[in-house]
């Protein structure tokens, strides 16, 4: 796609209703799973073990269902591209290596911004567009979430949950120990991720800007003339 | 010899296990209470309310049972004249043989030869101990185990509750008062009122194992003659009211259920449709997947049955219902006399108000416990015994009278609850073996009456033809009793967190990962460092933003939402 020189900022619904439902229900489930999970782990003792098992299991099943729907949604809407931070970088020579280079330059710019620029009042180096709702750092973080931490949790969690189906295999006790270890480690990583994620939501124009945006779906993005015309014609309700 | 140490331990245990009110003064000193009254209570089982017989025969109408009978053996003769296979059948029963060749270890076990850590041995004391052998005239070791004429049918089949047994021999004169004043047995009435055994029949011996009510097992007491549902759901007198044989299925006089070789796990379950397997496992009625699968919890609980015995969760406590069990026994203090006579002290008052003897000249000191939490261990079902012939290393005390194996990896093992009995008992210091004590007899060596342990051991070993160095000492022993009775109502079963917690009931069981109990301290440390690190970085970053904003270095913070 050729660069369009004429771009203007518009308030647009960039997070669709399903996307917001996904985000907030996932957030609630993850916090609930962390709470019940750390009860099971023995770190906190606010629930009876049996109650915690029940709640943790049902919440896990709910989250797995949500992810199945969301995976379907991501692929049918094309939204999956948002989670591949290198994918939409087009370079003049068309080489992947160049795309990676561009990505890492952008990543560094965002990291530099959060470490330093934000304190000096600089503008965010990433301008949100319809094609790239996430900046490079955010994209990389969400990718990590979606292909490392998330799967580590649900894969080990499902195996853990179905222990009674495979407890007859040789060395089942050892495998359970390994599964429990990985599940616990991934849970800590998930919570650490969530802490940073929550803090990052306060770095917008105002501390609550991003949160409001994730509730209403509306964000100021730079639209090309073509995009603007397309939205105004086809999706007037998305234009703020 | 650290007698004071034991006494302190005993006092401490008492203080922990129960708050026992001081018994009335006349209860404490039994010196003049009339000599030895051991096992008197075995003849104190109360008459039954006769339940309608389901039999197709009325025994009172049989001419064979018209009598008169002068003795039990004459009654037996009459029984066997019709039940012409019963005698032969019974000769193969452990109740008769008192001998058991272990199919896996090959050890010869059974009361005939074993040493336990209660009254220690029946061998050489048959005149007394055979009071609980379903036989007449069993006075010594050379009893004829092939003579069906000596079988005691009515001890198990009497339905009047008036039958009782007395020791086969007189014993020391000091013991002669034990069964004085009992009404003579009305043999005709007893013979005409036979039926299937009730809990009281079995209980007349099994409730009193170890020399008194609930002394040995902890989960088998006189409370089970007529228990409430809270004590035992199956034997509940107002509910299921099971007889012993409901679980201990008996066919041709062979009874299912043995603690020498148990099915620690019963993979067969209920068996074929309509079949009642001759197995005394919970699974033989309830199946291997006993919890209703109408919810996650039932599915999860069924997932435990491969590793956790039913009893582990469903018998959270034993020695329930007001009758205590012995937990510690010290033979070292046996033999103390007052005015040349044996005596006893009653310093424990159990839940039902009965004062229990805490010291007896004939046995030593005891500690009691009630409503006890079991000890839990992996158990493969096979008991290995320290017999009279087993040499042990005294440095490795406590010596396990019976021991067992088991582990998480072993598919034949499950976690089982046990009562552990601790005793300090005599052993052969020279040969490092257990010893037979000669307790009962009208000779001058029997400990009960003469109170000379050296003599009693020398006599006991010689009589049995066992090598004896001539020098005895005392050694700590443990014995382990699987807990299977006193099944609690289901809402009193253990909850998940009783085990799935850091200091839960299975805190000491190693070799497997258990959620809620186990983890990795360093993983937790790293995890919390990551989480609190993230929080710390966020707070530091937020403070920097805030300060720089106040100093008007940044522009962003002043912006209002558009």
Image: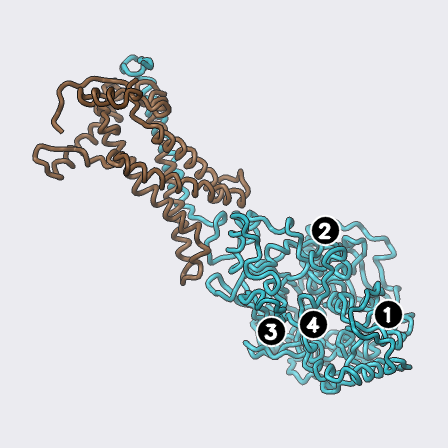
- State the scheme by which the image is colored: by chain
Is residue A21 depicted above or below B37 in this figure?
Answer: above
Residue most toward the front? Answer: A233
Q: Which mark, by number, is residue B162?
A: 1
Residue at image coords 59%, 77%: B102
Q: Earlier in the sequence, mark 4 or mark 3?
A: 4
Residue B67: x and y in percent read: 90, 81
The answer to whether the residues at label 2 and label 1 have Cβ atoms under 8 Å apart is no
- Same chain check for tags 1 and 3: yes
Q: Which chain does tag 3 point to? A: B
Colour of chain A in the image: brown
Q: Quadrant of residue B252?
A: bottom right
Q: Earlier in the sequence, mark 4 or mark 1?
A: 4
Residue A34: x and y in percent read: 44, 38
Residue at image coords 58%, 48%: B495
Residue B166: x and y in percent read: 83, 74
Is residue B345 depicted above or below B458 in this figure?
Answer: above
* Marks 1, 3: nearer the viewer: 1
The answer to whether the residues at label 3 and label 2 have Cβ atoms under 8 Å apart is no
* Marks 2, 1: nearer the viewer: 1
Q: Earlier in the sequence, mark 3 or mark 2?
A: 2
Dot 3, how many residues are within 10 Å of its Cα: few (below 14), some (14-19), or many (20+)? many
In the picture of the structure, the residue carrying the numbered disc 3 is B386
Dot 4, how many residues are within 10 Å of its Cα: few (below 14), some (14-19), or many (20+)? some
In the picture of the structure, the residue carrying the numbered disc 2 is B18
Q: Secondary structure at mark 3?
A: loop
Dot 2, how many residues are within 10 Å of its Cα: few (below 14), some (14-19), or many (20+)? some
Q: Earlier in the sequence, mark 2 or mark 4?
A: 2
- Same chain check for tags 4 and 3: yes
Colour of chain B in the image: cyan
In the picture of the structure, the residue carrying the numbered disc 4 is B120
Q: Which chain does tag 4 point to? A: B
């Amino acid at each position: 796609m050729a660069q369009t020189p004429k771009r203007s900022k518009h308030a647009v619904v960039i997070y669709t209703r399903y996307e917001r439902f996904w985000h907030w229900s996932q957030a609630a489930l993850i916090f609930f799973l962390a709470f019940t999970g750390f009860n099971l782990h023995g770190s906190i003792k606010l629930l009876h073990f049996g109650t915690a098992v029940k709640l943790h299991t049902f919440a896990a099943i709910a989250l797995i269902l949500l992810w199945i729907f969301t995976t379907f949604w991501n692929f049918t809407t094309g939204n999956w591209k948002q989670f591949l931070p290198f994918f939409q970088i087009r370079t003049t020579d068309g080489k992947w290596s160049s795309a990676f280079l561009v990505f890492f330059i952008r990543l560094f710019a965002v990291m530099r911004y959060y470490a330093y620029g934000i304190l000096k009042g600089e503008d965010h180096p990433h301008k949100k567009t319809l094609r790239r709702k996430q900046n490079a750092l955010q994209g990389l973080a969400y990718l990590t979430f979606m292909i490392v931490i998330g799967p580590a949790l649900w894969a080990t969690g499902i195996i853990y949950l179905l222990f009674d189906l495979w407890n007859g295999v040789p060395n089942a006790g050892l495998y359970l120990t390994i599964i429990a270890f990985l599940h616990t480690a991934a849970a800590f990583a998930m919570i650490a991720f969530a802490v940073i994620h929550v803090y990052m939501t306060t770095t917008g124009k105002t501390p609550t800007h991003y949160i409001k945006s994730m509730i209403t779906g509306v964000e100021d993005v730079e639209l090309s003339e073509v995009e603007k015309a397309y939205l105004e014609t086809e999706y007037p309700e998305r234009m703020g | 010899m650290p007698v004071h140490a034991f006494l302190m331990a005993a006092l401490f245990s008492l203080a922990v296990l129960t708050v026992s009110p001081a018994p009335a003064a006349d209860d404490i000193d039994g010196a003049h209470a009339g000599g030895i009254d051991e096992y008197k209570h075995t003849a104190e089982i109360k008459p039954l309310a006769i339940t309608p017989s389901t039999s197709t025969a009325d025994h009172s109408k049989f001419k064979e049972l018209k009598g008169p009978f002068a003795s039990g053996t004459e009654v037996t003769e009459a029984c066997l004249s019709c039940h012409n296979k019963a005698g032969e059948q019974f000769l193969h029963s452990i109740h008769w043989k008192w001998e058991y060749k272990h199919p896996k270890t090959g050890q010869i076990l059974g009361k005939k030869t074993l040493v336990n850590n209660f009254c220690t041995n029946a061998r050489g004391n048959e005149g007394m101990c055979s009071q609980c052998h379903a036989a007449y005239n069993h006075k010594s070791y050379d009893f004829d185990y092939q003579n069906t004429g000596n079988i005691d049918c009515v001890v198990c089949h009497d339905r009047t509750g008036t039958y009782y047994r007395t020791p086969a021999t007189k014993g020391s004169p000091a013991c002669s008062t034990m069964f004085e004043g009992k009404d003579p047995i009305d043999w005709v009435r007893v013979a005409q009122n036979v039926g299937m055994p009730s809990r009281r029949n079995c209980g007349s011996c099994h409730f009193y194992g170890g020399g008194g009510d609930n002394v040995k097992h902890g989960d088998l007491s006189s409370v089970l003659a007529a228990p409430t549902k809270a004590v035992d759901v199956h034997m509940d007198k107002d509910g299921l009211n099971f007889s012993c044989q409901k679980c201990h299925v008996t066919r041709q006089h062979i009874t299912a259920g043995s603690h020498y070789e148990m099915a620690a796990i019963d993979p067969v379950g209920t068996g074929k449709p309509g079949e009642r397997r001759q197995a005394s496992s919970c699974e033989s009625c309830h199946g291997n997947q006993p919890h209703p699968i109408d919810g996650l919890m039932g599915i999860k609980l069924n997932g435990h049955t491969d590793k956790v015995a039913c009893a582990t969760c469903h018998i959270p406590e034993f020695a329930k219902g007001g009758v205590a069990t012995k937990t510690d026994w010290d033979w070292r203090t046996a033999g103390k006399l007052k005015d040349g006579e044996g005596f006893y002290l009653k310093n424990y008052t159990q839940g039902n108000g009965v004062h229990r003897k805490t010291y007896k000249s004939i046995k030593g000191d005891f500690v009691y416990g009630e409503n006890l939490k079991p000890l839990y261990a992996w158990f493969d079902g096979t008991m290995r015994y320290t017999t009279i012939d087993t040499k042990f290393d005294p440095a490795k005390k406590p010596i396990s009278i019976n021991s067992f194996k088991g582990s998480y990896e072993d598919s034949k093992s499950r976690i089982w609850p046990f009562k552990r009995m601790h005793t300090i008992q005599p052993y052969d210091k020279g040969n490092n073996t257990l010893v037979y004590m000669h307790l009962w007899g009208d000779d001058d060596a029997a400990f009960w009456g003469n109170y000379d342990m050296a003599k009693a051991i020398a006599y006991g070993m010689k009589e049995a033809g066992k090598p004896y160095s001539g020098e005895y000492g005392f050694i700590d022993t443990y014995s382990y009793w699987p807990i299977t009775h006193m099944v609690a109502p289901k809402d009193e079963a253990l909850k998940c967190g009783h085990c799935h917690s850091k200091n839960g009931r299975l805190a000491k069981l190693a070799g497997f990962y258990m959620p809620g109990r186990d983890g990795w301290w360093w993983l937790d440390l790293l995890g919390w460092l990551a989480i609190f690190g993230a929080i710390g970085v966020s707070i530091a970053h937020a403070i920097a933003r805030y300060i720089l904003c106040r100093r008007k270095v940044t522009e962003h913070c002043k912006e209002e939402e558009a």
